Image (cartoon, grey):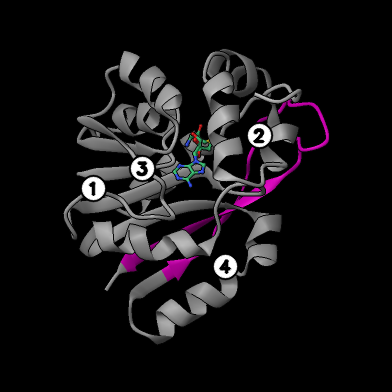
Amino acid sequence: MDSKAPDLAAAYDLASLSGTKRLYAEWAKTYDRGFAAEEKYLLPQRTAQAFVTVGGKGPVLDAGAGTGLCAEELIRLGICEIDATDISPEMLARARQKNLYRSTIEADLLAGIPVRDGSYRGVISSGTFTHGHIGPEALENLLRAGASRAQFALSINAKFYHKAGFAEAFDRMLAQGQITDLALPKVAIYGSGATGEHQHDTALIALFKKS
Ligand SMILES: C[S@@+](CC[C@H](N)C(=O)[O-])C[C@H]1O[C@@H](n2cnc3c(N)ncnc32)[C@H](O)[C@@H]1O
């Protein structure tokens, strides 16, 4: 990778897919015990909890699954049929070591996900709709993977939500009848004891159903 160490600041600065792959290839080695543990990163758990609270069921596609932190919480909550998709083979390799997923699928969410249309009753994502990562352009591909009436729970960094045009994208999807039941609860991304400039950052969890 380039001179930047793998951390949140470097992740928020990403500007290309090759940069993303390079950063996560390196970050995979320390992501769980470094970033997630030290920064009290709780968004994966909060996203999984929101999904289950609104009645989400498996099989679930975990988009931008990384090392599997969302799946750990889904399994704790009783949902066990979960597939992971991510652009980083190194992050997925870490997830595989934990035996969380039925399968792991290496794919660029912006280019398409190689699964049959309508395969999943649930689609979840945490930490991937954020600065330097992916925007509303990926929503169509995720919708395609969901079955009719599939429950979605996608966390979106609150500042990025406005900057990247998610409000307009959801308005359009509602107006076109592609989704229903949209709710956008706000959650803290980090727990108490977090440090650094992003310690108070929030995310919206976009909860909706595919029509
Ligand atoms: C901050 S991590 C979040 C991982 C995990 N969901 C979590 O909350 O810990 C962002 C993940 O998004 C993945 N990612 C970034 N851009 C992507 C893309 N275009 N397609 C698929 N995955 C992508 C990265 O490889 C990384 O694993």
Q: Which residue is drawn at 63% across and 61% down?
A: 161
Q: Distance between the residues labelled 1 and 2?
A: 26 Å
Given the image, on which type of amino acid does mark 4 rest? Phe
- Label 4 residue SS: helix
Given the image, on which type of amino acid does mark 3 rest? Ala
Residue 166 disc label: 4
Q: Earlier in the sequence, mark 3 or mark 4?
A: 3
Given the image, on which type of amino acid does mark 1 rest? Lys
- Label 1 residue SS: loop
Q: Which of marks 1 and 4 is nearer the N terminus?
A: 1
Residue position for label 1:
57
Q: Nearer the viewer, residue 20 or 99?
A: 20
Q: What stretch is highlighted in magenta?
A: 182-209
| Observer able to see residue 67 | no
Residue position for label 2:
190
Q: Residues within 10 Å of mark 4 (few under 14, many from 20)?
A: many
- Residue 83, quarter of picture: top left
- Residue 178, quarter of picture: bottom left
Q: Position of residue 111 (x, y in %)?
A: 39, 55
